[in-house]
Image: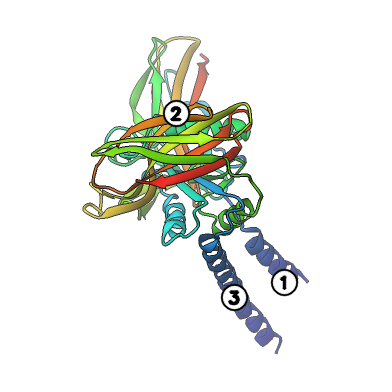
Amino acid sequence: MYRLAILMMSLLMLFRGYTKGQTSSGQISWECILKKTSSDEGEILIKAKIPAGWHLYALGNSPNSPIRMNFKFTANKSYELIGAVSQPKPLSKLEKQLGIPVTYFEDEVTFGQKIKIKGKNGLVKGTIQFMQCSDEICVPPQDFGFSLKLRP
Amino acid sequence: MKTLKDILYILSLPLIITMIMTVKGFADDHRLADIKADKSDKSFAVVELFTSEGCWSCPPADELIAKLQKDNQNKKLFIMAFHVDYWDHQGWKDRFSKAEFTERQRQYASWMKLHTLYTPQLVINGKTEMVGSETSKVLSGIQSAIQENHPENLAIKIDRNEGRHVQVSYSSSSSSRHSTILMVLVQKQASSQVTAGENAGKSLSHVQIVRQLQRRILKAKDSFSFNLPDADKDYEIIVFEQNQQSGEIIDATSISL
């Protein structure tokens, strides 16, 4: 019986023109937390949840490509950045259109930014500029602003 | 015995899927041929594709409009490719992109109450939108549009065509209020050289690229001037009347330069 169900599903998907990249349900969501590693150091963990069928472009793609992905932190006296934003090893593929190899993530990814905490009750503010595509469509680069309290 | 049945069953699935895909492919080819051969003149289809060289998912949509344009006999099929500018940055730019084309796409998002812009987006007669690479949807959308009944109320003629300077005038018998008239200079073919990556030196080909867009309030007659970007290319001018409250396109016509 379940085999019949699978067959029916496959046929239905074919006839309906299965679109896994519809814009309304394809939004990437972000979550930021601070993980303290010592009394005056910590790491800001920025997690992206990527809907099925979509991909998020990784950091470090060529500036000669249309890909925009970056993190901006607003400087203030309560903290200092240590090094640059880290990311896990991304997936990679050759984009046929321009022949450029590009790197990206699917499902879920966590970026990290180490910081030195210098003041009490400080605030880390920043913006993530990111770009997402499915196999069928791409949506314009988006900005996600975040703000994180530094509790003593 | 049961295992053999299972194996046969599993093997039959891809076969069925391939057969369905082939049938769908034939149906699309048939639709495409029908649209291009239609001479009924009952109605029109204004096809606006929002695309970019910087959008990885756009080439199938660009190919689809190229198929529609090739050897097209349907005088009531008007195709325009608007290259949006939101993929341009730093060392990368689509030379056909313009901010006002992105603005036009935003206007559609507002008319159609869409949450976000995307490429490739295709709009038919200002009323329906879809992913530009969904061949079956696009072709059936065009077919429905050209089967409607619309009175012809627009006419266009060339007043002057000297060197790069072109002056075109239209006359309209439309009685609708809230309408604007849009005149669009379309370059029929173009190719861009890829300057970076492994495809450096190769060219990307495009069709029906919108180079200039002008709009004014609809009058009984008016004239527009254009300066051609390159004198040695083939162009056409598409003129259409659009309702500014709903986005619906009321009538359209075109003339080759």
How far separated are the C-alphas under marks 2 and 1? 45 Å
Q: Amino acid at mark 1?
A: Arg
| Left or right: where A148 falls relative to A70 | right
- The numbered dot on residue B88 is none
- The numbered dot on residue A128 is 2
How far separated are the C-alphas under marks 3 and 2? 45 Å
| Left or right: where B24 falls relative to A150 | right
- Find disc 1 in the rendering and name its residue: A3
As displayed, is residue B203 above or below residue B169?
A: below
Q: What crowding class fits label 3: few (fewer than 14 Cα within 10 Å), some (14-19), or many (20 or more)? A: few
Return the residue nearer the eye: B235 or B125.
B235
User: Does mark 2 fall on the same chain as mark 3?
Assistant: no
Q: Whole-percent x and y of residue A94?
A: 35, 54
Could you tell me which secondary element the residue under label 2 belongs to? strand
User: Does mark 1 fall on the same chain as mark 2?
Assistant: yes
- Find disc 3 in the rendering and name its residue: B19
Q: Whole-percent x and y of residue B163?
A: 23, 39
Q: Which numbered disc, 2 or 1, marks the residue that appears first in the sequence?
A: 1
Q: Amino acid at mark 2?
A: Ile
- Number of marks in the rendered image: 3
| Marks 2 & 1, CB-CB < 8 Å contact | no
